[in-house]
Image: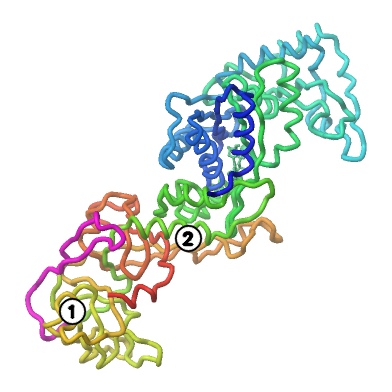
Amino acid sequence: MVPKDFIREIIDEDNASGRFDGRIHTRFPPEPNGYLHIGHAKSICLNFGIAGEYGGKCNLRFDDTNPAKEEEEYVSSIKDNVRWLGFDWEERLYFASDYFEQMYKWAVDLIKKGKAYVDDHTADEISRMRGSLTAPGIESEYRNRSTEENLELFERMRKGEFRDAEKVLRARIDMSHPNMNMRDPVMYRILHSTHHNTGDEWCIYPMYDWAHGLEDSIEGITHSICTLEFENHRPLYDWFLDELEIYHPQQIEFARLNLTYTVMSKRKLLELVRKKLVSGWDDPRMPTISGMRRRGYSPASIRDFCSRIGVAKINSTIAIETLEHAVREDLNRTSPRYMGVLDPLLMRIENYEGEDEMDVINNPEDPSAGRRKVPFSGEVYVEREDFMEDPPPKFYRLAPGREVRLRNAYLVTCTNVVKDGSEVKEIVCKVDPASRGGDAPDGRKVRSTLHWVSAKHAIDAEVRQYDKLFTVEDPLSMPGDFTEYIDHDSLKVLKGCKVEQIVGKLPHLSRFQFERLGYFCIDPDSDPDRLVINRTITLRDTWAKVKGK
Ligand code: ATP
Ligand code: MG
């Protein structure tokens, strides 16, 4: 059995001690200020996964406490992404902004207890007065305002009587606390800004540390799982809940996901979008869930990846190949096989007339995928790189005088090469009519199997091939700006590719394998007049496939 991770161990202990009466209630709390990325997928799989395993619940909660950066578009993309990943929040869709009134009341409670005060200093001054790890902070001269004055000023803050940043509400804790987060942190700031949910109702907005524990408490969350950088915010999370004497969830921190060749911060991803360095949030090279979906990654492969990497208490970086491995494994199991030729070279079969239909297995890994008929004729396209006029010793594919197999069709031998100057225009072959289906009756072996499409039955496609977006493993650690490390060859567009007709009938985002080439999917840019295909990922080992029939 796979050992349980430390979070599930904590939950088991809480269940054993009856701490939350055996309840398990988690939440996924994105801030709607960008599209979700693969790091969020880890958090989604963890929170929804735990709820599922323990018969608990998981809320989807938008942590929309910051009006300036949040947009409706992000809310709908996040919902869409969570659903696509295969998770269901049922009726539990919440917005932190719906709790603003309750939060305000609790802030008033803290003021009445002498635990919060209105400060007239600016954010810069407050941060300068916070001290350092080695020096205590300086107490603000407004720290000892009377409760009455604080209540009055806070109410006037809410009413909009002050300008942005003119005043803040701070918790009154300890300016020489060894944990800097406890040095009278800001709870509310003034922002005259329209909020996507509450409109212009509020002009004071709660800070994350103040708001988050309250949101968890209101929703009856048992285990509030977040990333490691919040570990030293936990004393503050606990302090607010303890001072208010309200229901108190357990915050647990785990290591965030980092991936090689990837930046994983919404702010950086937004920069790529804004500067048009990618085509959008769903550019297939983006580490966003929308990008991966468009690229052809399956939800199952992302879930599998998240469960493989597990959760830990120490930050580390996972190789992008680990994700690609999970993608290949799932696509290998689930993708129907078709044939497509990316760089077509015409092969004329001199002794073949008419047409035929070859009977083909759709997916050798999945018998339930059935079979299909693939049209064959005397002119087929093969991959230009599968032919060499003057092959070096280890090239086993087609060459003059050599016999190869056209997959699921016939054995053919190259008899002639038609050239235009140095360029090969077409190749002429002879078929062994007794090898229909792809095997010689005398059992003779050929060393190579090629994919092909019948020329008159093929349709044109544009194929987009993607590579890693960055040229270096950790773009953010490099000198200069991270965008300098973008690989401008990471998108290659191939036009005039020839593919089986059936591929043109697939719905958007359908995933499939092109034999010998890799996994692909139909790009949403496709329409009835134009077929656009994304290459999701190459096959692990092209040669392993070539050996078989
Ligand atoms: P970013 O830095 O990309 O903006 P964030 O943490 O600010 O991410 P939120 O929308 O606040 O993004 O995050 C929602 C949830 O997803 C949080 O619980 C957060 O801890 C988690 N999360 C974000 N990034 C990662 C990551 N790389 N690995 C695991 N969990 C993550
Ligand atoms: Mg954030």
Marked residue nearer the N-terminal end (1 or 2) = 2
Question: Dot 1 corresponds to which residue?
Answer: 410
Q: Which residue is mark 2?
A: 325
User: In the depicted view, which residue is nearer to us: 440 or 275?
Assistant: 440
Q: Is residue 248 magenta?
A: no
Looking at the image, what colour scheme do you see? rainbow
Q: Position of residue 480 (x, y in %)?
A: 69, 59
Q: Residue 471, which numbered label? A: none
Please state if 121 lies on the left or on the right of 395 as rendered.
Answer: right
Tell which of 480 and 238 is nearer to you: 238
Q: Secondary structure at mark 2?
A: helix
Q: Is mark 1 within 8 Å of ligand 1?
A: no
| Secondary structure type for disc 1 | loop
* Horizontal and vertical percent position of residue 227: 65, 40
Residue 508 horizontal side relative to residue 413, left or right: right
Q: Residue drawn at (53%, 46%), measured in percent from left and top? A: 37
Q: Nearer the viewer, residue 503 or 240?
A: 240
Using a 10 Å C-alpha cutoff, classify the residue at mark 2 as few (fewer than 14 neighbours), some (14 to 19) or many (20 or more).
Answer: some
Q: Amino acid at mark 2?
A: His
Q: Is residue 428 left or right of residue 11?
A: left
Numbered range of the magenta stretch: 349-375
